[in-house]
Amino acid sequence: MADLDVTKKLSVYHLLYRLNLSFANIVRRCRQLEDTRVVPSKYLRQFQGFAQELQAEMNQELLLPLHEREMDDWYRYGKVRAAWEKYLRDPDDVFIHAEERHQQLLRQGKKPPRLHGKEKKAPRR
């Protein structure tokens, strides 16, 4: 799908909403007709089912490209957030996370890798 601006995306979702609202109205009108008992219920229930099947099929076909577009946007705009988080990150955070992981492994009874600068050297004799 071509790149959508925010306004066009809103328009597409609004049209999809209106389409689904129209199907809901068809089902509601069939139920109202059923309440009149003028038209046999079996036909009206059948028409409701046809309408809902068509609605589901159309939603499936229309939402697939929208889902792909949203995934692309999520990835693209996620880069903006990641860049901002990288900008805010303290360069020393890596040492804090390494120490936290070291302690986590010790609590789990596992042997953590050696952290450079943390080991005490044996005294020379």
Image (spheres, rainbow, N blue to C red):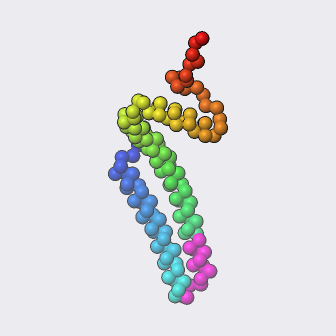
Instruction: Answer with the quarter of the image where residue 54 lies.
Output: bottom right
Q: In which quarter of the image is the C terminus?
A: top right
Q: Which residue is drawn at 46% across and 73% down?
A: 25
Give the residue at the far top of this rendering. Answer: 125
Of residues 76 and 109, the one nearer the viewer is 109
Taking the magenta stretch, the answer to whether it contains residue 45 is yes
Q: Position of residue 61 (x, y in %)?
A: 54, 54
User: Residue 34, relative to residue 46: is it above or below?
Assistant: below
| Residue appearing at x 52%, y 32% in the figure | 98
Any part of residue 109 in sight: yes
Quadrant location of residue 106?
A: top right
Residue extent of the magenta highlight: 37-49
* Rendered residue at 40%/38% (across/down): 85
**Magenta stretch: dominant secondary structure:** helix
x then y, percent, for residue 35: 53, 86
Considering depth in this image, is 67 or 98 the residue closer to the camera? 98
Q: Is residue 88 left or right of residue 48?
A: left
Above or below — where is 31 with respect to 87? Answer: below
